[in-house]
Amino acid sequence: MRAMKSTPSLHLEPRRSLRAVALVTASHAATATLLLALPWPVGARAAGVAAIVLAGALAVRRIAGRCAPASLRVGVDGRIAIARRDGRMEAGEVLADSYVGRRLTTIVWRPDGAHRVRTLLILADTFPEEDFRRLRVVLRYGRALDAASGSNGVDAGRSASHA
């Protein structure tokens, strides 16, 4: 009986997504503008706008700042390892709640030993076209293996048709 070879993980180095920064900035600015239009006291509106600006700044930091991934490894076995720009390393498990689309992918994952899940937003401009395609294939193939083994998750057959 031959021993099975382990499938190598996909190693990628994401670049900063200008589209993601623009989308996050625009959505937070629109939310702040809507809040300013509400008939609330000035103090309440100012506090709300401050909270929205803070949330937007934290979101931009996660996708383009020091907390953004400098590299990631994703395996068909559902494992992910992320090296952040600030030098921190994290590893965990990709969850079935992840979304794999043609222009947008969100990796929902749980770091080892953590209770809360995290998300990783990946737009098409984060990687060269071929690397983005390879990432989507690895994520979908991992889901197909989960579905074949009977685990609970996203319908891999439906998702794979959008590759």
Image: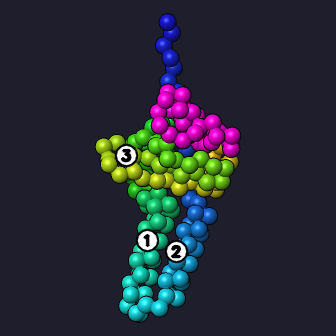
Q: Would you call the spot at circle 3 few (<14 residues within 10 Å), some (14-19), or many (20 or more)?
A: some
Q: Residue 111 or 128: which is nearer the viewer?
A: 111
Q: Is residue 4 magenta?
A: no
- Give the CA distance from mark 1 to mark 2: 8 Å
Q: Is residue 135 magenta?
A: yes
Q: Position of residue 50 (x, y in %)?
A: 41, 81
Q: Secondary structure at mark 3?
A: strand
For marks 1 and 2, the one nearer the N-term is 2
Magenta residues, start to end: 134-163
Magenta region, main secondary structure? helix
Which residue is depicted at the point 47% across and 37% down? 152
User: Looking at the picture, which amino acid does disc 3 mark?
Assistant: Pro
For marks 3 and 1, the one nearer the N-term is 1
For label 2, the residue is 28
Q: Is residue 121 above or below residue 154?
A: below
Q: Position of residue 39 (x, y in %)?
A: 47, 91
Quarter residue 10 falls in: top right
For label 3, the residue is 111
For label 1, the residue is 55
- Give the CA distance from mark 3 to mark 2: 28 Å
For marks 3 and 2, the one nearer the N-term is 2
Q: Residue 37 or 84: which is nearer the viewer?
A: 37
Q: Secondary structure at mark 2?
A: helix
Q: Position of residue 64 (x, y in %)?
A: 51, 62
